[in-house]
Image (tube, grey):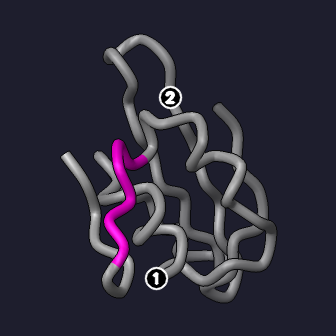
Amino acid sequence: MGFRKGREIISGGWENTDNWRKLKIGMSTIQVRKISGEPYEISVSSSTDRETWYYYPGHSKKVRFTYSSQKLESFNF
């Protein structure tokens, strides 16, 4: 499965470790989605300007991206 980035196909989304190296703090949610694909779950804090995206590889470990003001603030695998 691949994800389209302009004319380029990003292969494997979040499951492809080569794509992890493309992620940079400060990227927009659109940029991250193009690299990592659709998250399994999105959690939005009503008291802060934070949004957390969860990806579930093998349903055993969470891959988490946290955004502030629609910019990537942190991520972990």
Mark 2: amino acid = Lys
Residue appearing at x 67%, y 88% in the figure: 69
Q: Is residue 65 left or right of residue 37?
A: right
Q: Main secondary structure of the magenta part?
A: strand
Give percent across and percent down for residue 29: 52, 78
Q: Give the range drawn in magenta.
A: 8-13
Nearer to the camera, 26 or 10: 10
Mark 1: amino acid = Ile
Q: Is residue 69 above or below residue 74?
A: below
User: Which image quadrant is residue 34 in?
Assistant: bottom left
In this view, the mark in front (2 or 1): 1
Identify the residue under disc 1.
Answer: 30
CB contact under 8 Å: marks 2 and 1? no
Residue appearing at x 78%, y 78% in the figure: 26
Q: Is residue 53 above or below residue 5?
A: above
Q: Quadrant of the N terminus?
A: top left
How far apart are labels 2 and 1 at the CA level? Answer: 20 Å
Q: Disc 1 on helix, strand or loop? A: helix
Nearer to the camera, 48 or 17: 17
Name the residue at the front extreme: 7
Number of numbered markers: 2
Q: Disc 2 on helix, strand or loop? A: loop
Identify the residue under disc 2.
Answer: 62
Q: In which quarter of the image is the C terminus?
A: top right
Residue appearing at x 35%, y 42% in the figure: 12
